[in-house]
Image (cartoon, rainbow, N blue to C red):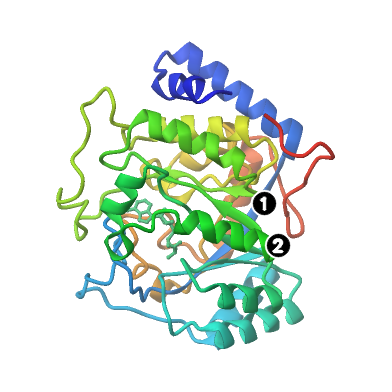
Amino acid sequence: MTTAELETWLRETNPARLETLWARADATRQAHVGDAVHLRALVEVSSHCTRRCAYCGLRAERRNLPRYRMTAAEILAAARQAAATGYGTVVLQSGEDPVLDADRLANLIQTIKTETPLAVTLSLGERRAEELAAWRAAGADRYLLRFETGDETLYEAIHPDRSGRAGERLALLATLRNLGYEIGSGVLIGLPGQSYTSLARDIARFAELDLDMVGVGPFIAHPATPLGRGEGPAPLPAHHQVPNTEAMAYKVVALTRLVCPEANLPSTTALASLNPAQGRELGLQRGANVIMPNLTPRSYRALYEIYPAKACLGETAQEGRTGMEARIRAVGRTVGRGPGGRRRSATGHGA
Ligand code: SAH
């Protein structure tokens, strides 16, 4: 699909036409990754962050937010619980926290890999190549690092610490690939200043990067951030500005499936937060094949406030697992077993 065609779809509002998009995405999902929905246990290991991303509630300048960092024992307990509850992957996510250094985390990864059958996915932000190498050597399997937006001007405007280095996340993805990680990336949908054209290019880029995983979700304004206070980039005129709506998020999920037929695509928490009753299911029916239930200890979960009113703030691990399984079965799908890594077809990625 060309960038122009992607943009036309992003602008589509006709319900009958959109039904054909959902159907194509669902058929592509079925043909390439099947009916299994893989559950990844998300453990938010630290809310400390040195960065000042203009959209994120964990930004360093937010001084009134109590911060936490899980101990190695707590993280290991969460991983054991994930394995015992039947998950195949644990995702360790955090702010950019220098205290989680190469050694501390490498030991932990090694222990998880020795004691459990879990695949280990890291989502710890922009880290030094030596750290990424040490964690890979310790057994980490995958790394998630969204490039957030491919529009360099917009990227610089919302990442004040490292302006002029917009390409850094893309360069890091190449580093991660060379280290042998499965790589995941993605973007925010509906950032103020994000145009339809730039979002269409971002979707085309997912295919060029040959991503193993793609996470996309609506931007949700947090009142304690510059974007939430209206201090960031100005929205574009309505016919250029991508809205941060649920409907737009489904279009991006569906189009991502069409351009990356083999990738693992989560139906994201941000989507579920816009529509707690149905968001996850509709994501699964429009191209997604992964769900990431939250296994962060409940006392910490509300403090990992990247945006307000995150879905699943109260659920326990077992409720999360049982509830999720019921939702998956209700839409005619099955729960995936094992690590659920990317399956590559002999011909490589499709068009
Ligand atoms: N520090 C890590 C993990 C960040 S949280 C990193 O930078 O990669 C994971 C994702 O949450 C981010 O990549 C971002 O796309 C998303 N996110 C952050 N703030 C958000 C917001 N206000 N609304 C929606 N998604 C947000």
Is 110 drawn above or below residue 323 in the view shown? below
- SS at mark 1 in the image: strand
- At horizontal 44% and vertical 57% (from top left) the residue drawn is 312
- Can I make out residue 282 in this image? no
**Which residue occupies the foreground of this view, 340 or 273?**
340
**Rendered image quadrant of residue 58:** bottom left
Is 113 drawn above or below residue 187 in the view shown? below
The Cα atoms of the two marked residues, 2 and 1, are separated by 8 Å
Residue at the right extreme? 346
In the picture, the disc for residue 175 is none
Question: Percent position (x, y) of residue 80?
Answer: 66, 77
The answer to whether mark 2 is within 8 Å of ligand 1 is no
The quarter of the rendering in which ligand 1 is drawn is bottom left
Question: Percent position (x, y) of residue 209?
Answer: 60, 45
- Can I make out residue 128 in this image? yes
Is 228 left or right of 220, judged from the image as shown?
Answer: left
**Which residue occupies the foreground of this view, 126 or 72?**
126
Is 336 drawn above or below residue 11 in the view shown? below
Q: Which of marks 1 and 2 precedes in the sequence?
A: 1
Question: Percent position (x, y) of residue 113?
Answer: 72, 77
In the picture, the disc for residue 38 is 1
Classify the position of the N terminus by image quarter: top right
**Rendered image quadrant of residue 239:** top left
Q: Are marks 2 and 1 in contact (CB under 8 Å)?
A: yes
- SS at mark 2 in the image: loop
In the picture, the disc for residue 88 is 2
**Which residue occupies the foreground of this view, 301 or 107?**
107
The answer to whether mark 1 is within 8 Å of ligand 1 is no
- At horizontal 73% and vertical 54% (from top left) the residue drawn is 340
- Amino acid type assigned to the residue bearing label 2 in the image: Gly
